[in-house]
Image: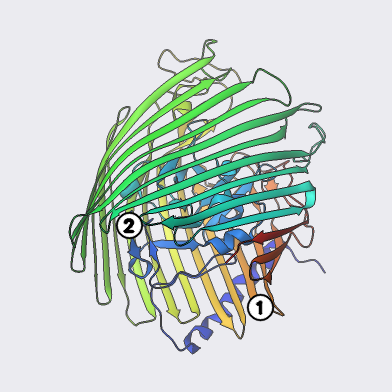
Amino acid sequence: MKIAPHARLAVLPIALAAAFPLGFLAASPAQGQTAATPSVVAPQLKEMVVSATRSAQPIGDVVADVTVIDRETIERAGPVGLADILARVPGIQITRNGGTGANTSVFVRGGESRHTPVFIDGVRVESQATAGGASWSNIPLSLIDRIEVLRGPSSAVYGSDAVAGVIQIFTRRGEGSFSPSVSVGYGSYNTSRVELAASGSAGAFDYALGLSQGQSDGFNARTIAAQNPDADGYKSLGANAKLGLQLNPDHRIEANVLQSHTDSQYDGGPTRDYRRIADLQTLGLQWEAKWSDRYSTKLAVTQGTDSGEEGLNGSTPQISYDKSTISTLLFQNEYRLGAHLLSAALESRRDVFRLVGSAAIPGGASVLNKDRSLDGVSLGYGWTGGAHTVQLNARHDRDSEFGGKTTGSAAYAFAFTPQWKASVSAGTSFRVPTLYQRFSVYGTSTLKPESGRSVEAALKYSQGASQYGVTVYRNRLTNLLSFVTGNGPCINGGPPIVLSNRGCYANTAQAQYTGLTLTAAETLGNVRVQGSLDLQNPKNRITNRTLQRRSRQYGTLGAEMPLGGWQLATDLVMASHAFDSDASNVVLPGYSVVNFNATTALSPDWKLTAKLDNLTDKVYQTANTYASARRTLYVGVTWAPR
C-alpha cells in the first residue's frame, strides 16, 4: 500500500515526540549544544563559533540558532553541491533546476534565497545579476573544511541581506607537520572527482592548499518534450590557498584565496543546448591583533567576484556576460571585561556590476556598468553570568542610493537547569535591491529596500548524548521584491517604458514567514538517531498565497552506527507539496528520498567511502518541468598518510 507524502511526513513529529522522554535518561550534563540532524555534527560545549556576532564565542554562550557542519560530514557527501549538505540542516529547504551544476535556491526559514548572505573565509560572495544572492552551484564543497549556519535575521551585525540567516564557510587552516591527501571517486552518470590537498606549518608560518576537479555527464534536466532530451552535465575546477604568519603570540596575519570554475549545460529549446560558464573568486587579507588581555582588533580587506557567461554550447560569442565584485574593508574591535564583551566595527563595502547583453539597458544599449557603496557602523554587547545570557546589537548603514538604515537586535537566554535553556530574541533587517533589479531592461529605478521585523523563542534540552529543541519564529517583510509579468511600466531613471509582455521588478508584496522547528538527537546503544521537522507558513500577506517552491512541512530523519569495521549512515529527506509559483496553481507533489552512506578504513592511511543516493529511485521535482537525479552510486578512495 502506498502512503501519501503528507502522511509519511506526519510520522516524523510522532517519532520525535515519542523519543523526547529518552532525553531524561542520560547521565552526563552538557549545555549549549545544538541538536544534530543527519549529516550534521552536534557541536560540543567548548567549540567556538563566529557567525552569531562575528566574534569567536563558545557555542554554549550563543543565544542565536546555530548549526555546525564539520569536515567529516562534508567528505562523506560525495560529488554533490553545497546546497545538498544544507538540505539536512534544520530550517533549510532547497530547490534546483536540474542536476548539481544547475541554478539552485536555498530557503532559510522560508526566506528568499537572496536573504541569506554567504561568506567564504570572511569574504562576502554574491551576484548582482537578477534577484541576487550567492551562486550556490558554484561554491566548491570539496574545498570546504567547516560550515556555520545561523538561522534568523542578523542585519544588526552584517548589514544588508541578512534577512533570514547567514552562512559562514571556512577552508582548512594549516597546523602541525606536512599532511598531504589524495581523493578519487567515480559514480553514476559517469561522474568523477579528484581532490588534492596539503597542509602544515613551519615555525611561525602555516599553510593549507587544495585543488579539486569534477565532471559528470548528468541527466536530462527537463521533463517536457519542448526541450532538448540530451543529458545536461557539468565540469568544475576549484583551488584554494590559506597562508598564515604568527608574528608573535598576539599578532597574526592571514591571506586566503579561492577560485572556482564551473561549466554547466542546460536546455533552451527542442534542439538547442545552452551552457553557463561561471567563475567565483575570493581574496582576503586580515590582521588579528591582541593588544591586551581585554582589547583586540581585526582589520580585514576582502574582495569577492562572481561572473558568468551564457551561450550556446560550442558557440561564440556569448549571449550575455555578467560580473559582480564586492570589495569590503572591515575594522572590528573587541573589549572584554570579565563576563562582558563590547564590540564595535566599521565596515565599508562597494559593489560593482557589469552586464553585457540584450538585458542590459532599455533602448538597445548592450552594456550596463553600475556601482554603489554601503558603509556601516555597528555596536555589540554580550554578557554571560550564571544562568543568564544577553546579546544586544545595533548597526547603522548608509547606502549611496537609499540613504541611512538602522537595525537592531536583542536576545536573552535563561538556563533554568543545567540541561534546560529557554531563549527569546527580536530584531530588524533589510536588503537593498540588486543593481540588475534597478537598472537592467527589467529594472525599476525607484525600487525600495526590503525591510523585516522578526521575533523568535526557543526551548532546548541537552544532557550527554541527548539533545532536543523547539524553536518558533515569525519574520514579517515589507516591500518584498518580485518580478511582475505582463506590461510595464518599468522606470529606469527616465520616463516610464512599457515593455510588452516582458515585465519588471517591483515592490509588490508583504511577506510573513512563520514556523516551528523541532530537533532531536539520541544515542540508543551504538546507534545515533537524529531528526528535524519544520512546520512553516511562508506566505504573501497581500494574496494570502504560499510563496513559491516552499513546502509547508519538511524534515529529515537519520541514523548512524558502526558495524563490522564500517561506519554506516542513512537519512530520509521528506517534503510536503509546494506551489511552483505563488501566482499559479501548479503543484509540486511531496516526496521522500532515502540516502545511504558507508565508510571503512582499508588501512591506517586509506579510507573507502560508498554512497547511494535516492535509494528507492524516487521520481520527484523541486521545480516544475525540471527533473531530479534518480538512484545514484558513488565510490571514493582517500589516501591521507599519518
Quarter of the image that includes the N terminus: bottom right
* Residue 45 numbered tag: none
- Whether residue 160 is situated above or below residue 527 in the rendered picture: above
Question: Is residue 121 in view from this perspective?
Answer: no
Given residues 334 and 293, the one toward you in this image is 293
| Nearest-to-viewer mark from 1 and 2 | 1
Given residues 291 and 351, the one toward you in this image is 291
Secondary element under disc 2, as helix, strand or loop, is strand
Circle 1 residue: 562
Q: Which quadrant would residue 600 be assigned to in this image?
A: bottom right
Q: Which quadrant would residue 316 be assigned to in this image?
A: top right
Three-letter code, disc 2: Ala
Three-letter code, disc 1: Pro
**Position in image of residue 217 (x %, y %):** 77, 42
**Position in image of residue 347 (x %, y %):** 28, 40
Given residues 475 and 384, the one toward you in this image is 384
- Whether residue 307 is situated above or below residue 285 in the rendered picture: above
Q: Residue furthest front?
A: 203
**Position in image of residue 120 (x %, y %):** 46, 47
Quarter of the image that includes the C terminus: bottom right
Looking at the image, residue 377 sits to the left or right of residue 367; the answer is left
Question: Is residue 430 in view from this perspective?
Answer: yes
Circle 2 residue: 426
- Whether residue 292 is situated above or below residue 160 in the rendered picture: below
Label 1 to label 2, Cα distance in Å?
A: 42 Å
